[in-house]
Amino acid sequence: MGNPAMDGGRSASQTGATITQFYTSEAWIEGRAEDQLHHVSTWAGVKRIAAFPDLHPGKYGPVGCAVLADRIYPQLIGNDIGCGMSLFQLDLPARKLKLEKAVRRIRSLGDPMDGSQFARLEQLGLPVDRSANALGTIGGGNHFCEVQTIAEVQEGCDLDHSLTYLLVHSGSRGLGEATLNALPQGAFDGLMPGGVDAAYYIAAHDIAVQWARLNRQIIAERAADALRADVRLISDVPHNILSDIQGGWLHRKGAAMAADIVPVAGSRATSSYLVAPLGLPGAMASLAHGAGRRYDRSSMHGRVRGKRSDIAAMERTPFGGRVICEDKDMLIEEAPQAYKSAETVLSDLESLGVARRIATLNPLITFKKTRRGDM
DNA sequence: ATGTGC
């Protein structure tokens, strides 16, 4: 049961591995997500699970957790291998950003790439014959590129609050998907470390992780070019990633990898946060990656109206910001109501000693998708 | 989530 000596979460071990829940009763957690958590804890070789307040149900298992096992379960990483969040600083002062002009310019993120991505892939020794045309593009679902301003910085945070920032959430597009699909029958029963199938998966996974990181970098460069600004990487944090650590294989699924600065994304209409993990052992160098889904995509169509005026309203945010999303279904499925409260996620992380906040960011422009790459 | 499924 409770194990306060180990960490700040609630630990329980039933039939399988120990599950530590780093969330309080304030968190909105679907029963189905906890059912999935317990199911995963019974899988062969699963030793320990850390669950975070953005926990929600996923296709093969819960999203918002880190799973330590002595086997490799590719489905726990999912199709979007290497997906994560990157924060970049622009040398563009917030007071100099002209919103309407910036919105017009940043739409070029929806254009296809110009071919320059091939040299970037070669530079890193990454394959140029697979998914290369998707490199530098954001993709669908919850992915985005946001221009952010700093609303508040905590003491000791040296980020320049007069500047603008980019928060990029994207992954490995078709490459990670192909990697998951190429696995032999039985792979989801767990790959044995040391075996050829595990070696194949690890090699392909590592490529997808590098590819996804490069993808976020190129997206940020394209956005910065559009805004006539220079860009500097502050922090890159994957949240779908497998790591070989002491004690086994750590599967992070919608769980950010601990780094000095970890972005915890809100919805497009609410603040995001930058946090510093505090090294709690039970958290296994992981933490929440965002607000987390409250409602699944399909149910959003029954919850949000899609009249012309509703769509127009959704393209504006309470911060006076803009949302560029010319796909009506996506606009509805990604409505702010689809997400939990990032503020509650943050307060759980803080009260349980997982992380402390270092800055609050507000979105000014959220780029999701243009109708066609013809602007 | 997906150079996307009926």
Image: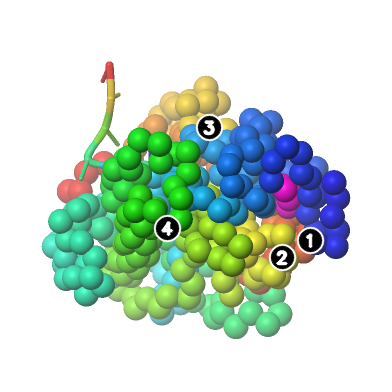
Q: Which of the two labelled residues, at mark 1 and mark 2, occupies the earlier sequence position? A: 1
The x, y position of residue A187, in whole percent, is 41, 41
- The residue tagged with tag 1: helix, strand or loop? loop
Which residue position is annotated with label 4? A194
- The residue tagged with tag 3: helix, strand or loop? loop
Q: Amino acid at mark 2?
A: Pro
Model colouring: rainbow
Q: Amino acid at mark 3?
A: Asp
User: Which residue does the image show at 50% across and 63% down from the upper left?
Assistant: A244
User: Which residue does the image show at 39% across and 53% down from the upper left?
Assistant: A195
Q: Any magenta on residue A138?
A: no
Check the residue under mark 2 and report the chain it is in: A
Q: Any magenta on residue A22?
A: yes
Q: Reply above or below: A17 against A321.
A: above
Tags 2 and 3 on a common chain: yes
Q: Which of the two labelled residues, at mark 4 and mark 3, occupies the earlier sequence position? A: 4
Q: Which of the two labelled residues, at mark 2 and mark 3, occupies the earlier sequence position? A: 2
